[in-house]
Amino acid sequence: MMCLFKSLCAVITRALFLLVSLISVWRVTQVKKDYNYWFLTFLFLPLLVEMIITLKSRMGKDYKWFSPPIFLFLISIIPSIWILELHYQQEEANGPKCKTLDSWENVRKVITLNETMGNLTYQSYLKALSNVCSDEWILALHQILLILLIVGKWLLPLGGGVTRDELSQLLLIFVGTAADILEFNSETLSDVKENSPQLVYIILAVWTWSMLQFPLHLSVVNSKPDSEGEQRVQEASVLTKHSTDIWSVVEALFIHDGPFLVVRLTVMTYFDVIHQMLVFFAIKNFLVVILNLYRLVVICQDYRSRDNRGSAIPCV
């Protein structure tokens, strides 16, 4: 019964991934008015193949250090978001009759649009949704993507060696990471000027790079030694003994806060865009980078002091 439940969770999670990816491709075809973009659905095939293989060989269980379904989900949806973002920045304006979702009244009008027509069909609903403003669509896709990454990781069956405690830590980290990534993408792209389209590519590239944090679990999942291997761990290198801490520092410096800081400093200095929130988050990224470097120094010094104590040199 438990195996059936885990398999069901694995299938439901991947089905949600495919559904959101399909919606993003549909939006691209509507915006570009070109049905050739339906070929983006071929990016769904690796996720389908992975689901079949995982269900047969692992009963739907995820892996310990890396999550293939989350990685393949990102591959299936990120190209569509790139196309929508670039199209919006190039067109730079919403349609004159587009509908915003900035109030409950506007949301209700979109949902109940067909009730006044007396003809309730899915085509009319799709038409109503296609009239929603481009920036509202893009923001919604970003939000749904990040929420689904968190919920999807929660629903996926645990990989071998991953404890519930480690999963809870990972999900809490995902929540904070998702909020920071959403702010970086939405706020920084809003600072783009008309004469700096290259900045859009830089921001989207850094955003894509930062999304790699979600399929990787190296900064949380730890390999705990058994009693027979404790002596070997005593003599292990600093990378082996503090692997989770070091990977956490590496992610912050090279995948998350480090690249975010570089982009924000570039926006302020080279593109001459400065405002209160941009300065605040640049300082926040700077502090995180400095604190992680400090953490790395503390780990190395602690390892050296322990190594010296174990080398038969008494401390006076």
Image: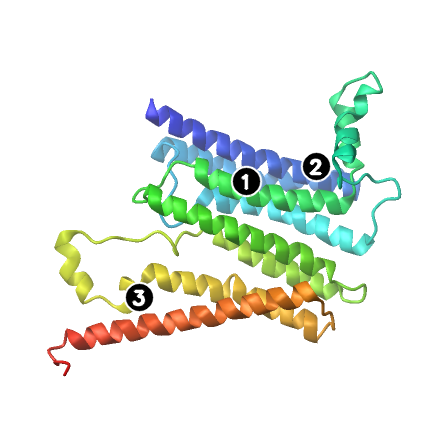
Callout 3 touching callout 2 (CB < 8 Å): no
The residue indicated by pointer 1 is 148
The residue indicated by pointer 2 is 26
Up-down: is 5 above or below 38? above
- Where's the C terminus, which quadrant? bottom left
Which mark's residue is nearer the viewer, 1 or 2? 1
Mark 1 vs mark 3, CA separation in Å: 32 Å
Outermost residue toward the bottom in this view: 316
Could you tell whether 201 is left or right of 238 in the image? right
Residue sitting at x 45%, y 46%: 171
Neighbour class for label 2 at 10 Å: few (<14), some, many (≥20)?
some
Q: Secondary structure at mark 1?
A: helix
Kindly tell me whether residue 215 is visible in this rendering.
Answer: no
Q: Secondary structure at mark 2?
A: helix
Q: Secondary structure at mark 3?
A: helix
Going from N to C along the chain, the mark reached first, 1 or 3, is 1
Mark 3 vs mark 2, CA separation in Å: 46 Å
Residue sitting at x 16%, y 56%: 229
Outermost residue toward the right in this view: 96
The residue indicated by pointer 3 is 239
Q: Amino acid at mark 3?
A: Leu
Q: Amino acid at mark 1?
A: Leu
Q: How far from the left and from the top, in percent, is residue 173?
A: 46, 51
